[in-house]
């Protein structure tokens, strides 16, 4: 249960950071997937 909550918090933090457009650490930069940002491609579906 705690592990799931931690994972959700991490995902939420990453999602919020990308949504707000704040600069993110390189570790959070998903890089390009097929020429476009991974999270952007997921959000645009």
Image: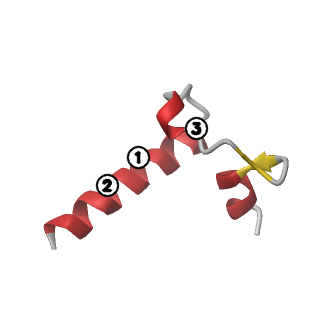
Residue 13, x across and y down, in percent: 40, 46
Disc with the residue nearer the chain's start (3 vs 2)? 2
Point out the image quarter for the C terminus.
Answer: bottom right
SS for callout 3: loop
Q: Nearer the viewer, mark 3 or mark 2?
A: 3
Mark number, residue 22: none
CA separation in Å, label 2 and label 1: 6 Å
What residue is disc 2 on?
Answer: 9
What residue is disc 1 on?
Answer: 13
The reply to whether discs 2 and 1 touch (Cβ–Cβ < 8 Å) is yes
What residue is disc 3 on?
Answer: 29
Category of crowding for the residue at label 1, using alpha-carbon neighbours closer than 10 angstroms: few (below 14), some (14–19), many (at least 20): few
The quadrant in which residue 4 appears is: bottom left
Residue at 83% from the left image edge and 54% from the top image edge: 34
Name the side, left or right, on which 40 lies relative to 13. Answer: right
Disc with the residue nearer the chain's start (3 vs 1)? 1
Point out the image quarter for the N terminus.
Answer: bottom left
Residue at 69% from the left image edge and 61% from the top image edge: 43
SS for callout 2: helix
Number of marks in picture: 3
Q: Nearer the viewer, residue 43 or 26?
A: 26
The reply to whether discs 3 and 2 touch (Cβ–Cβ < 8 Å) is no
The quadrant in which residue 7 appears is: bottom left
Residue at 61% from the left image edge and 34% from the top image edge: 21
Category of crowding for the residue at label 2, using alpha-carbon neighbours closer than 10 angstroms: few (below 14), some (14–19), many (at least 20): few
Residue at 58% from the left image edge and 38% from the top image edge: 29
Q: Nearer the viewer, mark 3 or mark 1?
A: 3
Residue 18, x across and y down, in percent: 58, 42
Category of crowding for the residue at label 3, using alpha-carbon neighbours closer than 10 angstroms: few (below 14), some (14–19), many (at least 20): some
Q: Is residue 15 above or below residue 27?
A: below
């Amino acid at each position: 249960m705690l592990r799931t909550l931690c994972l959700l918090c991490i995902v939420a933090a990453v999602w919020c950071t990308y949504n707000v457009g704040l600069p993110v650490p390189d570790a959070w930069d998903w890089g390009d997937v097929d020429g476009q940002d991974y999270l952007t491609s997921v959000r645009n579906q």
